[in-house]
Amino acid sequence: MRHITIGITQGDINSVGFEVIMKVLAESKIYEGKTFIVYGSPKAAAYHKKSLDLPNFNFNVIASASEALPKRANMIDCVGEEVSVDAGMATQEAGKYAMMALHAGFEDLKNNKIDVLITMPVNKDSIQKAGIVFQGHTSFFGKAFNTTQHTDLFVNDAIKTCYVSSASQLSQIVKSITKDAVLEKIVALNDSLRVDFGISKPKIAVLALNAVLGDEDAAITKAVEEAKNSGFMTVGPYTAEKFFATAEYKNFDGVIGMYRDQVVTPFKALSYDDSYLFSMGLPKICVSPQMSLDYANVGKNNADESPLLCAIYSAYDLLKQREEYAELIKNQLK
């Protein structure tokens, strides 16, 4: 695998995000085959460093990605103004700064100045209070890249799962579960499992909408049957309770639920440290570590850096697999 450049956005400056970033980048072995650029505020980073036992750690502040040094913790100041850290507080200023970092990281990713982007946790309420419409990292990237097939894919060693409807109200969820919507998600997940994870013939489980199969599940059944007839290895619909209670998910490469809580709740119960969120269906690799803002522990030097480590190595593997797949396809066409 070639040497790659990984971007990391600062996330919420009032959270444990910077503590975790600095703990990870203070370890020399993390730089093997990788150059890192953090998009954020040097002043916010300096504030958080005071609570850490990292006397020899400093950010190398640069003006552009082309100036990044391979064995240094590089930072691009994408805030460029006086920053006040209100540790452990949800503020609209933190929301604004999180989005400034996200925009800067995206621009470099889009323009091939970095290879992958890792997004630290943000507070959606803080962002919205700053007057910015934000539904999540994957939605942001999907709109920015002008793609329609993007979706959250929650990944750990036990399961890879996504969901069909992004609606929050039950009545809206029911209306959005159509045959075409389910079939579109089957195709998208199948493609990602092949291209990004190297699974040649993915086996995909599809969950029912209801605890007991009802009329609303007819569209799901039709989508599964149509997918089968098109050559996809798709099975379902399964009722979610039985599917997870009997560990049926172990027999599948991917699982599609109908709404977020249906799959994210069991996903988080199954694992944590080896989990990450992959923004599936984008032209670039974007990964978010599965960790909380943890406002209560800001400044206590006890935040766990393993979710970010998992995100870094997973992003590296995803890029490697995607490039290997592209090379394989190119050779087949010759």
Image: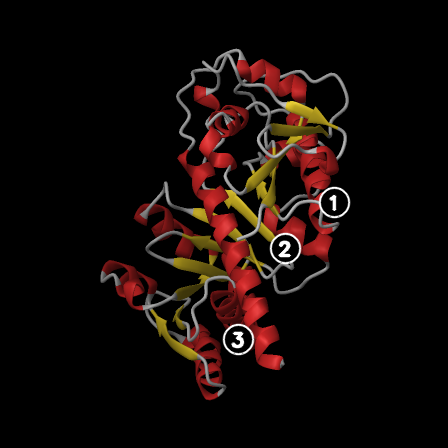
Which residue is more in the foreground, 105 or 260?
105
Residue type, numbered disc 2:
Lys
Q: Earlier in the sequence, mark 1 or mark 3?
A: 1
Residue tagged by mark 2?
284
User: Which residue is at a point 55% across and 61% down the rendered structure image?
Assistant: 322
Q: Residues within 10 Å of mark 1 (few under 14, many from 20)?
A: few
The vertical placement of 75 against 263, above or below, is: above
Residue visible at 22% across and 62% down in the picture = 246
> Residue 40: which quarter of the image?
top right
In this view, the residue in front, 26 or 156, is 26
Left/right placement of residue 248 relative to residue 98 reads left
- Nearest to the eye among marks 1 and 3: give it: 1
In the image, residue 192 lies at what x, y percent?
Answer: 52, 65
Q: Give how far apart the Cα atoms at labels 2 and 1 are.
A: 12 Å
- The count of marks equals 3
Q: Which structural element holds mark 3?
A: helix
| Quadrant of image for the C terminus | bottom right
Which amino acid, mark 1? Glu
At mark 2, the secondary structure is: loop
Left or right: where does residue 332 sit relative to residue 226? right
Which residue is disc 3 drawn over?
Answer: 183
Q: Specify which label sits upstream in the sequence, 2 or 3.
A: 3
Gap between marks 2 and 3, in whole Å?
23 Å
Badge 2: how crowded within 10 Å, few (<14), some, or many (20+)? many
Q: Is residue 136 visible?
A: no
Q: Which residue is mark 1?
A: 107
Residue 25 disc label = none
